[in-house]
């Protein structure tokens, strides 16, 4: 019996899973709504973490593991995190062998830099475009397997939903060709979702425009559990834009950039003052809240706006060229000012979702045969992700998901090819009818405008600082938008190449998932990692050291909670004004 | 979708930016130019303007129209998706700032690739070409086999430039030898051969790649117009790569001829 695995998503997670499966000789159908090389992973700038200890600083995988658990405010299950951290140096070796153009030391070894939440240089990088280099290398390897007939690519096809059999096992997917808008069904013995992040729910973010979380939302509505949705990372530094908030990588601070505002007429390096042990290298949730305090509470932001200076004007131009040219170029191109000479002005922006589809240690969701890997699942970052940990988590999860999906498929009593074709045809027809139904909508509402409203509300109320009354009001707003969704008009653009109909479908996905995020935040009455409530400013381990699990019901998400697995490290107070060792002294 | 504002004719104000966009429903349909007036805002880029049209698809005459179809994704000039012809020049719409463009701003699809609709073309051929030239490093497997070969920083600094190619198609658009009548593979794939051949492991398969570039549509069809390197938004030294690969093919050609 020849197993067939479907992978949805051609970012780092999906491509890595594809390579793993093809390498063992099995066949893969790889779907991506954009050519894989244009996936959001290309945006990653700063680099990828691995405790390679090549600077003689005494780094170790244990330190990296501890920083990750501590940085995530103890919300991550520890066993999978530990395995990922231990695999990280080997992943770097692998990417090195694939020819990634990592920066080198004078002797020719792979160079490392520092990112936030760590005292060690453990971030491997290729200039300031690391994600681009990594994904290209994986894409090349997949092309090789395509050449060998093991991988079939379906690029510019959008996943709509999964096909489930009588036992609710996942048996394939329904997809739409984004050029012709034709709806098709593909059977498979296992499906891996590697569909990335959801920044678009917040209107504008540092994410790419395809990052709507639609695929996750769709399977959530089909019964997959969604975990820790309320944990959304706000990156401290981005440049504002009406179309997008462009990230200014943490590596800028890692390589010596300093954050400041004017106070009493003089530059005030508030991160360095408040967090002497880590300075500008505090984790993102800490830096973002500090900026919020300086700008909103103390009203010291640049031009009285929510902006601070990010300064590299004191750095060696040669070093900037070697390590930071990618980001510096972006700033120059979009702002028109040279950061080598004038301090940049940056502000916090929605960046990453720690939450995602619930998966077990084999990366399988609660739906048998449906796996998830990468930013679309929740497993590796707890309540706050450390810079540089996501690239490694995405690739590691792909490395686990691929072989585990294959193993699952091999153990199936009946392969999908043996199932009745009616099962698949029914699933296809259902989605085709739904598409037709959207085509026929000629109401007054414009889906792009509804999206903008959703984004404004989410951004205003469900990001850095959260208040229960506002969260409540936001959920009411989402319900209103869901009402208005039914009055959308899609105009009369012909079918071929139509973009408004697929966008309308994605909008429904965003609305459903935004309720999971908002209500998850409403229920969690504590502050932990990226989730901060002034009404409940402390972490509350007694009541909330647990994973949020949201299940879809027609009346809205139903929440339940699961204890966190802590086999290695006991929770301790998380603070960055002192060295980590100090926080370890009082642990029971 | 009819919006109260859209029923009355919108008069352009000095704060409006005029866009003239080449539109077509796809192959087999005729194309036409449609004008749009978009309210100006500081730091506006072409993608931002297209987004405004999505939210309110009304043309310069105040008529309801269909939203313009175009591609975009990263919006920071690393994914290559939003490449189109802006005022006669192929470039990314995200990094095209309105303040730096003369108005009216004319948008048209790339011409060297099959049209899909409006500003969208099908650039699949660029990915197929990467496959044709075997632009990958053949590793033994993904198992833990230790690090790759050491690479001097000087080599990395050169290859890093090449590895920034986002397959956007700007080089092909600028190249006179990429056209309907020729099969020329174009500059991007050749630079990727240079990239992989420059890697110690990649070099082990060098000949196969050179072979792929020696037949019809291969490197010999480069007419040395040198437009590509100037057009590349990432500043990739494409002409230098073409020269390097050209030398490699000559040496390889002579050697295989001698060994016949
Ligand atoms: C600006 C920026 C910079 C970053 N820098 C870093 C960094 O330096 N270090 C770090 O560790 N992390 C960084 N991150 C985070 C990191 O880049 C991402 O989390 C990671 O790349 C996600 O990889 P992925 O494979 O999960 O998803 P993606 O790369 O987003 O890929 C998702 C894939 O799914 C496909 N897809 C989605 N939906 C569908 C659908 N419905 N149908 C078909 N296909 C679909 C897409 O086409 C795409 O191929 C950064 C993120 C941003 C936004």
Image: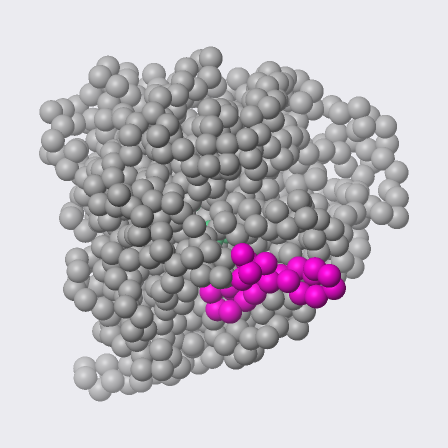
Q: Residue at x 21, y 38 (%)?
A: A362
Q: How many marks?
A: 0
Q: Residue at x 46, y 24 (%)?
A: A523
Q: Nearer the viewer, residue A51 or A168?
A: A51
Q: Residue at x 55, y 31 (%)?
A: A535
Magenta region includes residue B72 = no
Q: Nearer the viewer, residue A206 or A380?
A: A380
Q: At which x and y percent is residue A293?
A: 61, 47
Q: Is residue A543 visible?
A: yes
Q: Is residue B217 visible?
A: no
Which picture quadrant has residue A296?
top right
Vertical comparison of A255 with B260: above or below: above
Horizontal side, residue A254 vs residue A498: left or right: left
Q: Nearer the viewer, residue A18 or A41?
A: A41
Which picture quadrant has residue A257?
bottom right
Which picture quadrant has residue A565?
top left
Q: At which x and y percent is residue A51?
A: 29, 62
Q: At which x and y percent is residue A254?
A: 47, 65
Q: Residue at x 81, y 33 (%)?
A: B62
Range shown magenta: A246-274
Which quadrant holds the C terminus of chain A? top left
Vertical comparison of A458 with B120: above or below: above
Horizontal side, residue A415 vs residue B234: left or right: left
Q: At which x and y percent is residue A432?
A: 44, 21
Which quadrant holds the N terminus of chain A? top left
Horizontal side, residue A19 vs residue A341: left or right: left
Q: Nearer the viewer, residue A142 or A62?
A: A62
Q: Give the colouring mode of the picture.
A: one colour
């Amino acid at each position: 019996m020849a197993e067939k695995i479907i992978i949805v998503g051609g970012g780092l997670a999906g491509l890595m899973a594809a390579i793993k499966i093809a390498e063992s000789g099995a066949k893969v159908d790889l779907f991506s709504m954009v050519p894989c090389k244009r996936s959001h992973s290309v945006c990653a700038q700063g680099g990828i973490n691995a405790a390679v200890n090549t600077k003689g600083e005494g780094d170790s995988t244990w330190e990296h593991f501890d920083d990750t658990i501590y940085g995530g405010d103890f919300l991550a299950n520890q066993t999978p995190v530990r395995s990922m951290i231990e695999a990280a140096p080997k992943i770097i070796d692998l990417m090195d062998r694939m020819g990634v153009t990592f920066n080198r030391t004078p002797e020719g070894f792979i160079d490392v830099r520092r990112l936030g939440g760590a005292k060690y240089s453990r971030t491997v990088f290729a200039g300031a475009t690391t994600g681009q280099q990594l994904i290209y290398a994986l894409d090349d390897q997949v092309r090789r397997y395509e050449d060998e007939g093991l991988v079939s690519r379906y690029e510019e096809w959008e996943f709509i939903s999964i096909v489930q059999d009588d036992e609710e096992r996942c048996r394939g997917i329904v997809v739409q060709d984004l050029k012709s808008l034709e709806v098709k069904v593909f059977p498979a013995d296992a499906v891996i979702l590697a569909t990335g992040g959801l920044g678009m729910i917040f209107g504008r973010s540092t994410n790419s425009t395809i990052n709507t979380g639609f695929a996750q939302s769709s399977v959530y509505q089909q019964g997959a559990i969604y975990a820790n949705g309320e944990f959304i990372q706000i990156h401290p530094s981005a440049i504002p834009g009406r179309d997008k908030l462009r990230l200014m990588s943490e590596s800028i601070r890692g390589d010596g950039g300093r954050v400041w505002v004017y106070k009493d007429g003089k530059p005030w390096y508030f991160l360095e003052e408040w967090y002497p042990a880590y300075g500008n290298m505090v984790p993102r949730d800490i830096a973002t809240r500090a900026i919020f305090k300086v700008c909103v509470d103390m009203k010291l932001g640049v031009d009285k706006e929510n902006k601070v200076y990010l300064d590299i004007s004191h750095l060696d131009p040669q070093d900037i060229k070697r390590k930071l040219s990618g980001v510096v170029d972006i700033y120059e191109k979009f702002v028109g000012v040279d950061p080598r000479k004038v301090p940049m002005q940056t502000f916090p922006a929605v960046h990453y979702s720690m939450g995602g589809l619930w998966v077990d240690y084999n990366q399988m969701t609660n739906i048998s045969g449906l796996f998830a890997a990468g930013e679309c699942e929740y497993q590796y970052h707890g309540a706050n992700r450390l810079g540089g940990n996501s690239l490694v988590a995405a690739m590691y999860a792909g490395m686990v998901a691929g072989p585990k999906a294959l193993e699952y498929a091999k153990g199936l009593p009946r392969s999908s090819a043996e199932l009745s074709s009616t099962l698949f045809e029914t699933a296809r027809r259902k989605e085709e009818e739904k598409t037709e139904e959207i085509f026929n909508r000629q109401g007054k509402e414009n889906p792009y405008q509804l999206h903008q409203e959703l984004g404004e509300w989410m951004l205003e109320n469900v990001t850095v600082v959260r208040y229960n009354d506002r969260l409540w009001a936001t959920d009411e707003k989402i319900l209103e938008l869901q009402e208005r969704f039914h009055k959308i008009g899609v105009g009369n653009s012909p079918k071929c190449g139509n973009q408004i109909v697929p966008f309308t479908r994605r909008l429904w996905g965003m609305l459903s998932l935004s309720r999971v995020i908002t209500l998850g935040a409403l229920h969690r009455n504590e502050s932990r990692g990226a989730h901060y409530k002034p009404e409940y400013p402390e972490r509350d381990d007694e009541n909330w050291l647990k994973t949020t699990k949201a299940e879809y019901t027609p009346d809205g998400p139903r929440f339940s909670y699961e204890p966190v697995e802590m086999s290695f490290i006991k929770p301790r107070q998380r603070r960055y004004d002192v060295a980590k060792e100090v926080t370890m002294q009082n642990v029971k | 979708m009819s919006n109260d504002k859209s029923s009355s004719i919108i008069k352009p104000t000095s704060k409006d930016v005029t866009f003239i966009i080449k539109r077509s429903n796809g192959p087999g349909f005729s194309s036409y130019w449609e004008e749009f007036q978009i309210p100006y805002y500081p730091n506006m880029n072409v993608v931002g303007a297209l987004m405004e049209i999505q939210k309110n698809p009304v043309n310069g005459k105040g008529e309801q129209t269909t939203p313009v179809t175009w591609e975009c994704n990263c919006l920071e000039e690393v994914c290559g998706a939003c490449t189109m012809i802006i005022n006669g020049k192929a470039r990314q719409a995200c990094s095209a700032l309105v303040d730096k463009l003369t108005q009216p701003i004319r948008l048209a699809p790339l011409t060297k690739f099959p049209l899909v609709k409006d500003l969208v073309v099908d650039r699949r051929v660029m990915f197929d070409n990467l496959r044709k030239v075997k632009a990958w490093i053949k590793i033994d497997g993904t198992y833990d086999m230790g690090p790759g070969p050491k690479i001097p920083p000087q080599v990395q600094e050169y290859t890093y430039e090449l590895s920034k190619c986002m397959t956007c198609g700007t080089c092909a658009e600028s190249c006179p030898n990429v056209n309907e009548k020729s099969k020329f593979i174009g500059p991007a794939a050749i630079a990727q051969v240079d990239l992989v051949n420059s890697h110690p492991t990649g070099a082990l398969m060098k000949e196969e790649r050179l072979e792929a570039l020696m037949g019809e549509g291969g490197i010999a069809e480069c007419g040395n117009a040198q437009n590509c390197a100037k057009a590349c938004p990432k500043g990739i030294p494409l002409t230098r790569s073409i020269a390097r690969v050209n030398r490699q093919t000559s040496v390889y050609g002579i050697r295989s001829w001698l060994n016949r």
